[in-house]
Image (spheres, rainbow, N blue to C red):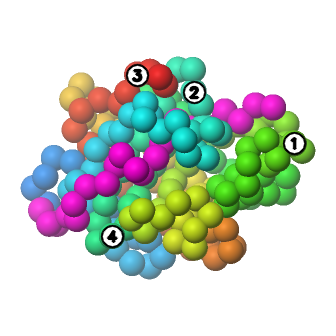
Amino acid sequence: MALALAGAMVFSSCHKDDDDDDNSSISQLSATVNENSFKTSLAAFYSSSSSGTTKLSQIFSSTSGATTIAGTQDGKQLAITINGTTSGTYNLSVSADNTINNTLINILSGESVTDAISDAVNVKTDAMVIYRATGETEGGNTYYFSTEATVNFNVFVAYATGTFTATMRNKAGDSFSISDGEFKVFGKPVTSSK
């Protein structure tokens, strides 16, 4: 069974101190999350190299490389992962397919990958957005993952910019939208999925 989703990412290596809202920072990540503002200048690219033990690392893989941009503000962490390292539009749309949607929900709610994918075939997406309380793990009430997402990603010589939107849910089925998402991150995406 193939679950080739965006890059494997974890927040265990992504925690940073809360933002001081300095708008002059080169790196920024902002969005309207459930009608609240999320804004940080502590955004950065993150490698998937140290994320081998989470559910996300088990289901997200990429032979060409994956890109994760993440940041922390006021005890909340937001991350956008795309299945690629080049400019383009990356999408996730599983909510219309009940089998795929339920498989994704089961995996990100803590079920084993083997059990969750037993009825799913050829699942492929190109983007994932995660929003959680600092330290929350898959299956927790404050661990939200996207069932719909669009990420526009633009790579330049020394930085990347982009926009994103997402429909989020947790294991319990609580949901909300992320809108007006924007990022500008100094550096370049990781070019290997290793």
Work out whether mark 4 precedes mark 2 in sequence or the reverse, and give the earlier one: 2
Q: Does 102 sit left or right of 155 as displayed?
A: right
In contact (CB < 8 Å): disc 3 and disc 4: no
> What secondary structure is the magenta-colored segment mainly?
loop
Residue mark closest to the camera, 3 vs 4: 4
Residue mark closest to the camera, 2 vs 1: 1
Residue count near mark 2 (Cα–Cα under 10 Å), binned few <14, some 14–19, many ≥20: many
Alpha-carbon span between mark 1 and mark 4: 36 Å
Eyeballing the image, is 47 above or below 164?
above
Residue beneath disc 1: 118
Q: Does 26 sit left or right of 187 as displayed?
A: left
Eyeballing the image, is 120 above or below 1?
below
Under mark 2, the amino acid is: Ser
Q: Which residues are magenta?
A: 1-22
Residue count near mark 1 (Cα–Cα under 10 Å), binned few <14, some 14–19, many ≥20: few
Residue 26 at x, y percent in the picture: 16, 47
Alpha-carbon span between mark 2 and mark 1: 21 Å
Under mark 4, the amino acid is: Gly
Q: Does 27 sit left or right of 4 as displayed?
A: left
Q: Residue at x 82, y 47 (%)?
A: 115
